């Protein structure tokens, strides 16, 4: 969750980061401004048509999108924020399988 003022002053998600990295650029920008943000967890979300439809890419398309988004992140961090970013951890994080979310009903 982010205060709306970030967007009121003109911050925009980079359109060239189509799938990943845009939220990381936002949190990096907020960190640099000594601001704060929070992640709302265990919040029910209703996805359009059951979800999962936006990420059905072929392996080749997925790898191209990861590359493009990684390059967008590095470019925006460098050009907009003045930060040099090591791409290796970004690539590893994007390619690692994600652990399933814990089952909230088990509590």
Image (spheres, rainbow, N blue to C red):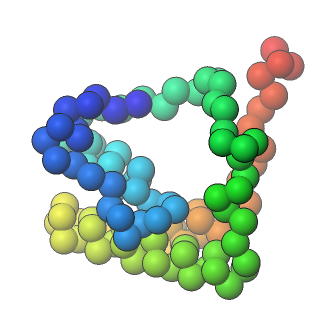
**Residue 63 falls in image quadrant:** bottom right
Q: Position of residue 14 (x, y in %)?
A: 32, 62
User: Residue shown at 75%/42% (left/top)?
Assistant: 50
From the top left corner, tell me how far across and down residue 13 is, in percent.
33, 55
- Asked whether the viewer can see residue 79, the reply is yes
- Decide which of 8, 63 is in the foreground and name it: 8
**Side (left or right) of 33 relative to 68:** left
Relative horizontal placement of residue 73, taking residue 68 as reference (left or right): left
Relative vertical location of residue 107 with respect to residue 50 in this rendering, above or below: above
Q: Residue at x 13, y 41 (%)?
A: 9
Q: Quadrant of residue 5?
A: top left
Q: Position of residue 106 (x, y in %)?
A: 86, 19
Among all residues in the image, which is located at the extreme top? 107
Q: Is residue 82 left or right of residue 102?
A: left
Instruction: Give how far across and how far down residue 54 sits, in percent.
Output: 64, 58
Task: Name the residue at the right extreme.
Answer: 106
On screen, 87 above or below 96?
below
Task: From the viewer's side, name the closer residue of 77 and 22.
Answer: 22
Residue 28 in view here? no
Asked if 54 appears above or below 16 in the picture, the reply is above
Q: Residue at x 46, y 65 (%)?
A: 18
Total labels: the figure holds 0
Quarter of the image containing the N terminus? top left
Residue situated furthest front in the rendering: 49
């Amino acid at each position: 969750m982010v205060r709306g003022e970030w967007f009121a002053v003109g911050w925009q998600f980079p359109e060239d980061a189509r799938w990943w990295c845009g939220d990381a650029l936002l949190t990096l920008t907020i960190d640099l401004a000594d601001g704060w943000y929070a992640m709302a967890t265990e919040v029910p979300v209703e996805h359009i048509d059951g979800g999962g439809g936006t990420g059905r890419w072929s392996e080749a398309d997925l790898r191209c999108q990861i590359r493009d988004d990684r390059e967008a992140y590095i470019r925006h961090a460098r050009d907009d924020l003045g930060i040099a970013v090591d791409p290796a951890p970004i690539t590893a994080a994007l390619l690692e399988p994600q652990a399933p979310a814990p089952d909230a009903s088990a509590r």
